[in-house]
Amino acid sequence: MAAMDWFTPWFSAPGHGLSRLVLQRALACLYLVGFVSAALQFRALLGERGLLPARAFVRRVPFRAAPSLFQWRCTDRLFAGCAWAGAALSAAVAAGAADAVPLGVSMAMWALLWLLYLSIVNVGQAWYSFGWESLLLETGFLAVFLGNGDIAPPVLVLFLLRWLLFRVEFGAGLIKWRGDTCWRDLTCLYYHHETQPMPGPLSWYFHHLPKPLHRVEVAANHVAQLVVPFGLFLPQPFATVAAGLVIVTQLWLVLSGNFSWLNWLTIVIALSAVDPSPLTGTPSYGGTPLWFAVLVCCVTALVVVLSYWPARNLLSRRQQMNRSFNPLHLVNTYGAFGSITRVRREIVLEGTDEERVTPDTVWRAYEFRGKPGDVRRLPRQFAPYHLRLDWLMWFAALSPAYTRGWFEPFVTRLLENDPPTVRLLRTNPFPEAPPRHVRALLYRYRFTTPAERRETGDWWHRTLIREFLPPVHAAAPAPPSSRDTPGDGQAP
């Protein structure tokens, strides 16, 4: 159908053309990270011999509860094909392919990215239970309707992206204010940089900032998440200023920890409120096709209806965080760290090649890529890449209740020297032959003080708490004790 120029002025926002371009290219890069992460880790985590096999999951969960391409066929080869196909398509879109094709083809490319990633998330189980998975899907769905270089960005979709950003930020602010008392007395950052799931290379330094500055950080966070989001709906240039404050806050979080692509994606979404036209001018576009305008209006109406449940959740005294209210992850609720862990606990897995375990047995530790282990190793920067096993090990240290279903198979794979599993680790102390026994010890970790750091060169100090898993051999690995109850850590 021909373009209808008469409604283009009120339907379109040509001044946001550059913002849309950067948003789409950056979103495609984050899709690329997500698909590469899936391709490199799925065999050990979700494969046919994975810790939580996707094939077993789809046999017991119906399509309507978890829509996925893998509901029809679930093999390692198909999973790898979908993940690498998604990575290739993401790279093409990031390079500008979606702007070099007609509008309908561009939308189909974005829709295929969304469908492939939805298929992975919906069979991902505990490995894909994080809020940023739904956030990527919700953003990716809206990106389908942002248009390409042929037309100006639609106002309605830009508004929906701002509504999404508002829910991310305001939801996170409310869950904190309603949750742990340390958010209200401004002391949470006395602990958080040390006890967060995946510290980064600067976390030690952030932890040792003066306590008054930590209190300022918390107060600034409350302003950024409880006040600033309302500015996203003000006229320009106030909306741009609000988006800029969100971006600065998220960059601070990028420096202080490893939260996969959560912070980067929030920055990307914030670009929807940035109007660069006073500096760059307003580009010219062709008219908007009527079919596209009608489709955008229908999607907007759908999102408005589906927003009822997230909005009600925001207003509820029993606010939930990181929940999808539909299996397509279209409109979700978000939030992070409603409560803060005061003490960091870490599980250290060790193996031995000795036939019998005695008090003199020599144990050698497995090292993970991201989570703390060797006290002399500086935490590395991995975000936006997501180390899924490392994250679940952090939860497992809070309570054995978080290990159900995957920890025992994990120990079994270590006893077998299973190649896909050991590739998830930084080091395998038994490269030639599998260990005879594996055990797990629970330690308390804390950052060293500056004086301890100068004296020992260590970044961490650790104290043994207890045995988490007694020595087991290949015949019958035993699950850890479940006498503890889940801790207060929460997945962002």
Image: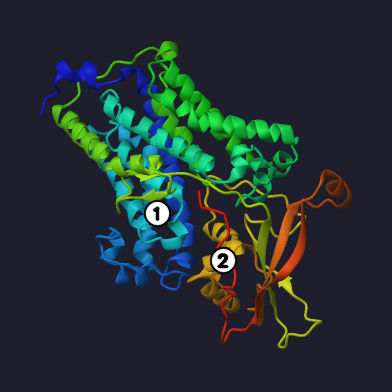
Q: Is residue 345 left or right of residue 63?
A: right
Residue 195 in the image: above or below residue 61: above
Q: Residue 246 has which mark?
A: none
Amino acid under disc 1: Trp
Q: Viewed as shown, does residue 353 lie left or right of 321?
A: right
Residue at (70%, 81%) from the top-left corner?
Answer: 353
Q: In the image, residue 91 lies at what x, y percent? A: 41, 42
Amino acid residing under circle 2: Thr
Q: Residue at x 45, y 12 (%)?
A: 279
Q: Which mark's residue is nearer the viewer, 1 or 2?
A: 2
Disc 2 target residue: 485
The label shown at residue 84 is 1
Label 1, label 2: how far apart the Cα atoms are: 39 Å
Horizontal side, residue 374 vs residue 71: left or right: right
Q: Dividing the image into 4 quarters, which one contains the N terminus?
A: top left
Q: Is residue 197 above or below residue 50?
A: above
